[in-house]
Amino acid sequence: MATAEGRTIPFVGPEAIDAAVLETFEYSGPDQDIVTETREFSAVCPYSGLPDFATLTIRYTPSDRCVELKSLKYYVTSYRNVGIFQEHATARIAEDLFRVLEPQMLEVSTLYNVRGGFETRCTVRLPAVGR
């Protein structure tokens, strides 16, 4: 829970993120890059309790699975009341998707709305080459 100028704004922790809703379907075909984007991603700043809004871009090359979009929407919506730093949200999305898809390549990028004069873009690429 965050307090700002005597006000309390409730939010939940990252344990409320529902990765169990992610569903996949079988893919067999040529290598292709799949790009999914939404401008409706939001989570809560754990510092202020205020919402953070971002454009979320997911790019992956499937091995043999693709993510089902309705399940992805439910997953993304589960962040709505979660207090999580922008960098951690981006990493968590990448890790959860990598776990269920086991893709050849996955890149998750978030471009957050300007706050305090700063535009923030976070990008995670998996598998991490050279680590």
Image: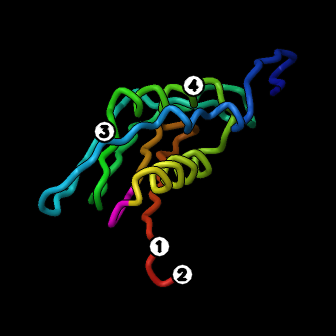
Dot 3 crowding, Cα within 10 Å, few <14, some 14–19, many 20+: some
Which residue occupies the foreground of this view, 110 or 129? 129
Displayed quadrant of residue 29: bottom left
Q: CA distance from mark 3 to mark 4?
A: 17 Å
Residue at the image position 33 percent from the left and 66 percent from the top: 104
Q: Is residue 32 magenta?
A: no
Q: Which residue is mark 1?
A: 128
Does the residue at mark 1 contact the one at mark 2 (Cβ under 8 Å)? yes
Task: Report the amino acid beneath label 1.
Answer: Ala
Q: Which residue is mark 3?
A: 37
Task: Report the amino acid beneath label 3.
Answer: Glu
Q: CA distance from mark 1 to mark 2?
A: 6 Å
Between discs 4 and 1, the one toward the N terminus: 4
Dot 4 crowding, Cα within 10 Å, few <14, some 14–19, many 20+: many
- Point out the stretch of residues depicted in magenta: 103-107
Query: Residue 56: image x %, image y %?
Result: 40, 40
Query: Residue 106: image x %, image y %?
Result: 37, 59
